[in-house]
Amino acid sequence: RSSDLGFIASFEGFSATPYNAYSPVRSCTIGYGHVIHPGSCTSEDFRTWGTITVRQGQALLKADVDRTLVPALRAGIPATPLTQPQFDALIDWIYNEGPAYITSRGSVRKALRASPPDYSAVPPDLLRYVKAGGQQVCGLYRRRMSEVNLWNAGSYARLSPACPPGYAR
C-alpha cells in the first residue's frame, strides 16, 4: 500500500501549513491534500493546525485513503475484480476528483459495474477528468496519463508527457 500512497503524494505535493485548494471546490487543506473543511482557511485553522511534519502529512493521507476512499471504492463497485494497480489508479483518481464519481455517478463506475465489467473503457474515461475551473490543465492531464499507465501497465511511474495544445500549464 505504500506505493499507492507515494503515487498520490507525488501529485498532491506537501504543505506543512493550511492552504486554500480549489479542486473540485474551495477547501482548506493541509499536508498531501487532506481537507480540513470546505471553504477558505481561517486564522483559527492556522492556530489549530500550525505546522505539520511530512510524517504527519503521510498519516493524514493514509487515514483519508483507508477511512474514506477504500470504502467508497468498494461500495461503488463491490463485485468488480481489480488488480492492485487498477485499484490504486482508481484510488488516486477519486482522491483527486472525489468519491461521488465511484459511489453514485460517473462513466468509470458504470463501465466497472457492467456485466461483464468493461475494463477497456476506464482509460479513456479517466482522461475526461482534466479540467479545473472549466479549463483543461496540463498537470491533470499528466496525472490522468499516469493513472492510465498504472491501470494498463501496473507501473507507479509519474509520467510527464507533453500536454496537448490548449492545455493550461
Image (tube, rainbow, N blue to C red):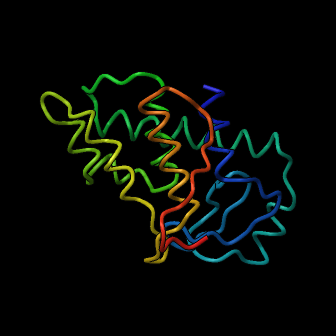
Toward which corner of the image does residue 90 lie, by quadrant?
Answer: top left
Residue occupying image coordinates x 20% and y 36%: 113
Image quarter (top left, top right, bottom left or bottom right) of the C terminus: bottom right
Say which of 12 and 150 sits in front: 150
Image location (x, y in percent) of residue 163: 53, 61
Number of marks in the rendered image: 0
Image quarter (top left, top right, bottom left or bottom right) of the N terminus: top right
Image location (x, y in percent) of residue 47: 84, 68
In the image, taking residue 124 as reference, residue 11 lies left or right, namely right
Q: Residue furthest left?
A: 115
Query: Relative to residue 59, is residue 142 depicted above or below?
Result: below
Image location (x, y in percent) of residue 112: 24, 36
Residue occupying image coordinates x 54% and y 35%: 66
In the image, taking residue 146 as reference, residue 43 lies left or right, namely right
Say which of 156 and 103 sits in front: 156
Query: Relative to residue 95, is residue 23 depicted above or below?
Result: below
In the image, taking residue 129 as reference, residue 2 lies left or right, namely right
Image location (x, y in percent) of residue 130: 45, 62
Residue occupying image coordinates x 53% and y 38%: 67
Query: Relative to residue 76, is residue 44 depicted above or below?
Result: below
In the image, taking residue 155 as reference, residue 20 lies left or right, namely right
Residue occupying image coordinates x 48% and y 36%: 149
Say which of 100 and 42 sits in front: 100
Toward which corner of the image does residue 110 lie, by quadrant?
Answer: top left
Query: Relative to residue 26, is residue 32 depicted above or below?
Result: above
